[in-house]
Amino acid sequence: MKRNLSQCGIAVAVSALACAFSSGAPAAESIGAPQPVPAFLSNADGQAQGIRCEAVGDDVLAHQTGKYAGSDMISGFVLNLLSQWQLPNGATAVAQGTLAVAQNAANQMSAQVKTYATVIDPTQGGTTGAKSGASQNASATGGQNVSVNGVSQITQVAGSGNSGANAATISYNNSNNNGSQIAGLQGGSNQPSASASNANGSIKAAISFGGNGVNVTLQTPAGLATQNIVPGNAQQAGAIAQLLQIAGNNQQVANQLQLSLQTQQMTAQMIRQTGVLQALRNLH
């Protein structure tokens, strides 16, 4: 299903937000666990590495020149979101979605979206019991009240034997690789939102795309996992937030976000014009 960009306001918001980040810079935060990392967490855990920064003074920056990815260079993007929670009693919650925005030769934008949510509870609604790993004497709160510009990743844990990871990756690709085509999402539908829950509502999974942003939420007796993308406006810059709150034992949780920006192919004439313009700007 294709939609005009004006009907999918988050498209421009995500693109503009992502342009603020450097190409291919991964951001990840993870918590360790005494047991082996489960298969669905292995990719996210492997990306768990810190971002290194070096401060540079104004006296150095004043003499530097370079290039950056302006908004006019972005011809589209693909956003993939996935949140998974596995409880020790075998219950599982999954919320997943993909948003693809592409620009044609006439500079017209179109958007496609797919969403998927499922909850599998072999206990037939009895997940609130002790076998769910939830701890009634533990709590993990406060992270949902944190507000930052840019990317934030918060992990709050009250329990033992847990595995969890927040992973976000932003990269640039040439638009000629057809990367703006929406990826296959098994079981997904061409709808802007999806939700699911078990019989007694103790486990819920939901995802939604809209003009107010992107929201992914998993709720279980042992905690909460969310991913949110908030568009920027005149008063506040945009933000990407990943949150894990685990108040239990032997929980396996993962938040994953992948944003691939498609850049326009520059002609030889455009490259020469850019080079001349930069040379003129360097003249004093």
Image (cartoon, grey):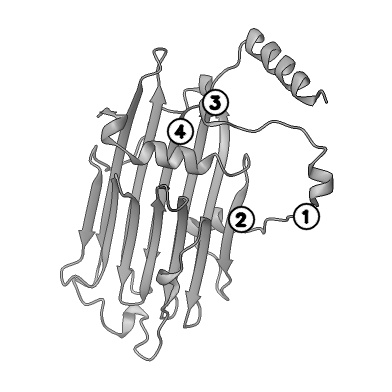
Q: Residue at x 51, y 37 (%)?
A: 260
- 3D distance between C-alphas at marks 2 and 1: 24 Å
Of the numbered discs 2 and 4, the one sitting upstream in the chain is 2
Determine if residue 166 is in view.
no
Q: Residue furthest front?
A: 284
Amino acid type at image mark 1:
Glu
Depth order, front residue of 151/277: 277
Q: Which residue is drawn at 81% across and 52% down?
A: 57
- 3D distance between C-alphas at marks 2 and 3: 31 Å
Please name which of the two marks, 2 or 3, marks the residue nearer to the observer: 3
Q: To which quarter of the image does residue 84 belong? A: bottom left
Q: Compared to 140, does 102 lie above or below?
A: above
Q: Is residue 237 left or right of residue 10?
A: right
Q: Is mark 3 on a helix, strand or loop?
A: helix
Residue 77 - label: 4
Amino acid type at image mark 3:
Met
Badge 3 crowding class, 10 Å Cα cut-off, few under 14, some 14 to 19, many 20 or more, is: some
Per the image, the residue denoted by label 2 is 46
Q: Is residue 180 left or right of residue 271?
A: left
CB under 8 Å between discs 4 and 1:
no
Q: Compared to 52, does 275 lie above or below?
A: above
CB under 8 Å between discs 3 and 4:
no
Residue 54 - label: 1
Per the image, the residue denoted by label 3 is 73
Q: In which quarter of the image is the C terminus?
A: top right
